[in-house]
Image (cartoon, helix red, strand yellow):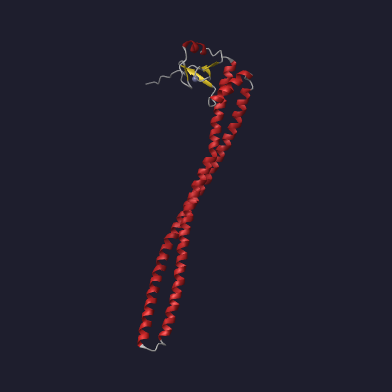
Amino acid sequence: MNPDLERLIRLQRAETDLRRVEAELAEVPRHRAELEAALGSERARLEAARQELSGGQKARRQHEAELQDLEAKRSRLKGQLMEVKTNKEYTAMLHEIEAVERDIRAREDLILAEMERGESLAVEVKREEETFKQAEERHRAAVRAIEERARGLEEQVRRLTGERDAVASTVPGGVLDLFHRVARSRGGVAVAQVQDAMCLVCHVKLRLQLYADLKRNEEIVQCPACNRILYYEAPPPTVVAEP
Ligand SMILES: [Zn+2]
């Protein structure tokens, strides 16, 4: 094989691997953001449960304060009952006391309802706290895994960059320029394999004479359709499975 062609094949492999690894590395921030968002929605659920509980407690304190006022009002009215002069006044005051007592019972019912609701909300908060704790643990483990993966990918980028640069330094300038020119216009892929008289990247059929020449891998030849530098590699031998 033409030694430059052989170097270009290796250069392309290093470039392709490098691009793949760089693309994976570029995904890391998005993965991290997804993890943060998932934990954030768990946190929001916990906060909502806590707010509902504290809202209920606030409502209960409000009812209790109102109950105290009503009880004070009832005592005051009962005190005044002794001082009324006429039957008519007396009856009116009794009615007023009854109305206050109805209000008191209603407040007591509300307080009881809030107490019951508060108990189940407290259970709910505990459950959400437990769920959040587990989510946090999973989150920490996932972040560690992602960071470890990112370090591995960064290491691969360094290694592949070194490999690529080492191969590139052995390619003559003109050939290297051709490689870069084609790579720039062809999505980073400047070298294409040929099999069965076909460019395996753009799938154009090659003239048989060109194919016959290519099979010797002696020249730097470009695909007539996509301009990529072509090389021939025999298909791997077909293994016939034992019945
Ligand atoms: Zn092609």
Left or right for 216, reference 71? right
Q: Position of residue 50 (x, y in %)?
A: 48, 58
Residue 145 lies in what quarter of the image? Answer: top right
How many marks do you count on the picture? Answer: 0
Q: Position of residue 169 (x, y in %)?
A: 64, 22
Residue at screen point 40% across, 66% down: 113
Is residue 35 visible in the rendered image? The answer is yes
Q: Judge by depth and name the residue closer to the eye, 154 or 169.
A: 169
Residue at screen point 63% across, 24% down: 166
Left or right for 193, reference 78? right
Q: Judge by depth and name the residue closer to the eye, 7 or 96.
A: 96
Image quadrant in which the N terminus is located:
top right
Residue at screen point 43% across, 60% down: 121
In the picture shown, does residue 69 fall above or below 87? above
Q: Residue furthest bottom?
A: 85
Q: Position of residue 144 (x, y in %)?
A: 55, 42
Image quadrant in which the C terminus is located:
top left
Left or right for 24, reference 107? right
Is residue 13 visible in the rendered image? The answer is no
